[in-house]
Image (cartoon, rainbow, N blue to C red):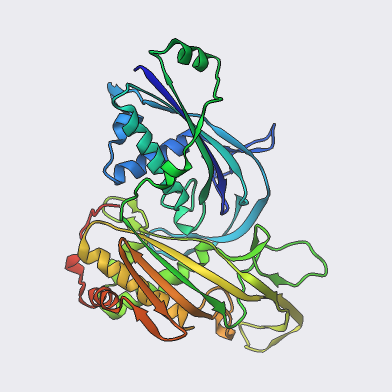
Amino acid sequence: MNKIAMIHAKIRSISPLHIGDGEGEILLDNDSNTAYLPATSVAGSFRAYLRAEGEDDISLFGYQEEEKGMMSTVYISDSFSPITNIEKRDGLKIDGEKGSHVNKAKIYRVYLGEGLEFDLNFEIHADEEKMPSYKKMIYKCLNALDKGHIRFGSQKSNGLGNFAIVSAEEIEFDFKNISDYERYLKRDYKSAKKIMDEIMSEKLSDSFVEFAIEGEFSTPVIIKAPDGFEVEGPDDSSLKSGGSYVIPGSSFKGALRSRVEKIGEYFGNRNIAEEMFGNLHKEKKRHRLSRVAVNEAKIKDSKEIIYNRIKIDDFTGGTRGTSLMNDMPVEGKTQFDVMYKRCGEKKIDDYAVGILALALRDLGVEDLTVGGNSSIGRGRFKAKAMTLKDGEILVNIDFINKSIVGQEKLHEYVEAVKNCRKEDLVNGSKE
């Protein structure tokens, strides 16, 4: 080792974040009232991404197997950020094997709101020959973090843990040069250079297929916020995050999964649809991770609407006396983003792209609702346009003018849904 490279990147959270301890509580430094991003979380996420992309993660992060092992060539520091706000959301505990909620198991989750800024510091020790390849791996991971291919914390596939790179710089010390050695000991980083262009130009693989569908809610939508203590406020109001009304990723993904499985049932391949979203492997007693990830959808130009309603007695079907209530759903524009991670089997991947496109089409033509109170017409979404990006392939769907660019390729994906059968499912496919 005759060189050390120091890479410093400032990152900002663009979605809520949950990094917890063993008890599920978010990690905080109570003395300084700051959020804590452990170096182990960064290293684990980067290592997993590089390994999935076929990179030599061991040479960078080392390994330990019983008495054998190799030291890591990169050292990462823990990071802290002042807390912007803390959010609480309601949820239901899900039975991983049955896929349904556990009775009387309503849970409350606490998250750190978006806007957290962390400093990521990487110190790479290597010789002159290997240093460029090690730095490129860190660049690639930082680019993947900015694109949402890498996320931190829990509930990642439900839209949490997204970050954007704010700035990045690098300085290199050559220990053959005595002045560089002195600068390193004195922590003199004055000659650091900006490397944002190098990071963003690092080519990422085509292992992700991306969907984006934009439009507006044609009927009011409500995702109920946790109960508050306001005396004069509505009984039920819509969920906010970062000052904006949002459709949380968990709600959207749940609706999307339900429709995907329904379409799979129609074509006789529901089991393949279920595999896309992860499940509990009954024989091996382990969880298969979801290959479908979504983002939280912020509602723009939102308009609040208050409705006065009466409660219905579930037993008699009549109204309950003195049970007047009101709720406040919202209307507005939004965009839903979905990513599918390829498993490596063409039949399965084409099937997944096709069935996701069909489910999102149902969403865009107001046939799939989002949020609560769908039985009284809430949560219908009318799409304006949808894009599907599969590597170099780009499909554009114009719902207003009823036109499609790339229709032949889209038809190929849809045909894969019709023709895929249970025997095509490859157990143990890459995750």
Residue found at x 33% / y 63%: 276
- Residue 103 appears in the picture as rendered: no
264 lies left or right of 9: left
Examine the image and state in which quarter residue 97 appears: bottom left
Quarter of the image with the N terminus is top left
Q: Nearer the viewer, residue 166 or 63?
A: 166
- Residue 264 % position (x, y): 31, 75
- Residue 414 appears in the picture as rendered: yes
Q: Residue furthest right?
A: 232
- Residue 122 % position (x, y): 46, 30
Q: Is residue 107 above or below residue 313?
A: above
- Residue 185 % position (x, y): 52, 14
Q: Residue furthest top?
A: 178
Total numbered labels: 0
Q: Nearer the viewer, residue 216 or 426?
A: 216
Residue found at x 57% / y 79%: 217
Examine the image and state in which quarter residue 173 appears: top left
Residue found at x 26% / y 79%: 267
Q: Is residue 237 above or below residue 19?
A: below
88 lies left or right of 325: left
Q: Residue furthest left?
A: 423
Q: Nearer the viewer, residue 364 or 308?
A: 364
- Residue 157 % position (x, y): 44, 56
Q: Is residue 249 above or below residue 66?
A: below
Examine the image and state in which quarter residue 210 appears: bottom left
